[in-house]
Amino acid sequence: MSTYNSTTANPGPLGLCGFALTTWLLSLINNGTFGGENVGLVLAMGFAFGGTAQMIAGMFEFSKGNSFGFTAFISYGAFWWSFALFKVFFAASVSAEFVGWYLVAWGTFTLMMFIGTLAKARALQAIFLALTITFYLLAAGDFTHNATLTHIGGNFGLLTALLAFYLAAAEIINESFGRTVLPIGAPKA
């Protein structure tokens, strides 16, 4: 998500992988591939990788002066912490409709972040567009109690995870080879 010199590690791939892998697992539940009884592994990933690793990446983005990377990684790290805490402690007493509003709020935040990507790599734009759609579809599923919308949202979540994983892989592989192996659609200057 940032440009770094050869002596400074790029925290972007760590944050993207924390986001991608945790989103991937939750999306397999949301799209109906696996049942809700498997959410415990998602929660563990949400605390450890989706939450904590993204927040660590965000702090390194902060130290580099990258407001976008800082805001994205800290915010989505906090999303995973809030999701995991909600599921562990509060899920039984919260209505699906209120969860829908939680998802609308995150969708709206993500839409704002998507607009912030329009001057950035196309791969990053694709991640934030797909995530915006994911949040709104999952919210619609909660508002209407429609499992089909939740399953479609889960499929968009899986797409989002794959896009984030691709960008993480591109940043690692391109840096390792010192050239573009996996294109990310860098915007024109």
Image: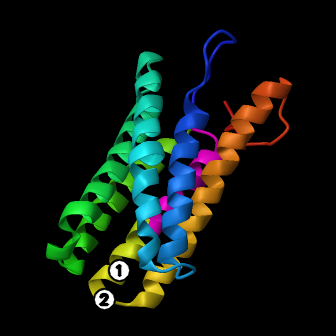
Q: Is 86 part of what is drawn in magenta?
A: no
In the image: residue 23, left or right of residue 124: left
Name the kind of residue labelled 2 in the image. Answer: Thr
Question: On the rendered image, what quadrant is the C terminus found in?
Answer: top right
Q: Position of residue 112 (x, y in %)?
A: 38, 50
Q: Is residue 149 above or below residue 25?
A: below
Name the kind of residue labelled 1 in the image. Answer: Ala
In the drawing, what numbered circle is on residue 140?
1
Furthest residue toward top: 7
Residue drawn 62% across and 18% down? Answer: 4
Q: Position of residue 26 (x, y in %)?
A: 48, 66
Colour scheme = rainbow
The residue identified by callout 2 is 144
Q: Residues within 10 Å of mark 1 (few under 14, many from 20)?
A: many
Q: Position of residue 144 (x, y in %)?
A: 30, 88
SS for callout 2: helix
Question: On the rendered image, what quadrant is the N terminus found in?
Answer: top right
- Magenta stretch: dominant SS? helix
Badge 2 vs badge 1, beta-carbon distance below 8 Å: yes
Residue drawn 70% across and 34% down? Answer: 171
Image: magenta residue range? 120-134
SS for callout 1: helix
Q: Nearer the viewer, residue 155 or 130?
A: 155
Q: Position of residue 167 (x, y in %)?
A: 67, 44
